[in-house]
Amino acid sequence: QVLKEGSDLDFMEQQLMERLPVKQVKVVPGDEDASPQEVKSLLGKEAANLLIASYHGDSVVTVTGGSTMAAVADYLQPVDDVKPLFVPARGGLGDLHEYQANSICVKMASQTDGEYRLLYVPDSIGEELHAKMQEEPTIVEVLQLMKQADIVIHGIGDAETMAKRRKTAAETMNKINEHQAVGESFGYYFDKNGKTVHRVNSIGLAMDDLKERSRIITVAGGRSKCEAISAYLKWGESDVLVIDEVIARHLLKEY
Ligand code: BG6
C-alpha cells in the first residue's frame, strides 16, 4: 500500500517535529527502495517547493550531489525577481557525472533562471595539493560563497552504498567497515552514534560550517537509509527534513 491517507502522514509530521531537533518535517508516502522512481519524484517535488519558499532576493544555495538532489532539480521553477546562485557543497567526490554537485548546480540554475559557480577539484587529493588548492583565487571565491550561503540543501547516503558508488579504495573501505559507518553526507562517513569515522579529502563545506547556516534542508528516502538518517541527526544539523514514510516510521521508533 503506497498511498496513505494525508492525515496519517500529517500526524507523523507533527510527532516528528515534536521529537526531533528540526523546525519542519515533510513526509511523502511509500518507501523509495520499493518504488524508486515514484517516491524519489515525490521527495524531489516537496523539497523543491520548500526550497523555492526559502528563497529571497539574491539567495545563495549550497547543494550536494546525488540522485535525490537531481530529483529536486527536476521540480525547481523560476520565481519572479529571484535569481538564486547555486554553489556546490564539495568538489568531485567520485560520483557519476549526473550526480555530482557541480552538475546538480548547473541543472538547478537552468531550471530557476538562476546562476551557478563550479568547484573543479579532483577527488581525494593528497594533503599538500589539498592545502595549495585552497589558496587558488577561483576556489577561494567559491569557498567564500559556499560559506555565506543562506540555504544548504543536501542528501544522505547509506555508508556502504556511497563507498561502493565512489569506488573507494580497499584500505578506506576497510576503515569505513571496521568503524561501522552507517551514513554519509558532505563527504563525511559517520557511525550510528553520529561520530565521524572518515572524511573524503575533497574541498568544500566542513561540518562546522553547517552550524552557522540559517536553513539546512535534508532530503532522503528508502528503507536502506533509515540508519543513515537517524545517525545524521546525531552527527549534523537540519532545519527541514523531507523524508519518506518508511524513514518517518523508523525515526518515530528511535526518537
Ligand atoms: C552524494 C552526496 O553525491 O549523494 C552525498 O555528496 C549524499 O553527501 C549522496 O549522501 C546521496 O545520494 P543519493 O543518490 O542517494 O541521493
Image (cartoon, helix red, strand yellow):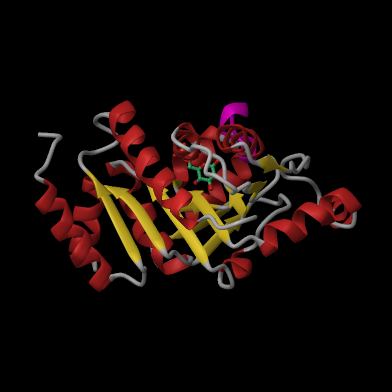
Outermost residue, front direction?
80
Where is residue 59, by image quadrant? bottom right
* 134 relative to 237, above or below: above
Q: Write the residue at 24% across / 65% down.
A: 16
Q: Residue at x 20, y 41 (%)?
A: 29
Point out the image quarter for the C terminus.
bottom left
Q: Is there any visible trace of residue 127 in the rendered image?
A: no
Q: Residue at x 43, y 60 (%)?
A: 232
Image coordinates of residue 177 in percent, x first then y, are: 48, 49
- Highlighted magenta segment, given as a residue range: 93-101
Task: Find residue 36 and report its horizontal and vertical position in percent.
Answer: 32, 29
Residue 13 placed where, x, y %?
22, 59
> Which of 62/32 is in front?
62
State whether residue 84 appears in this view: yes
| Residue 188 position (above or below residue 111) | below
Vertical side of 167 occupied by 124: above or below: below
- In the rendered view of the protein, which quadrant contains the N terminus? top left
Asked whether 225 or 164 is in front, the reply is: 225
> Residue at the location (81% across, 49% down)?
126
Q: Is residue 202 magenta?
A: no
225 or 240: nearer the viewer:
240
Image-based side of 78 in relation to 254, left or right: right
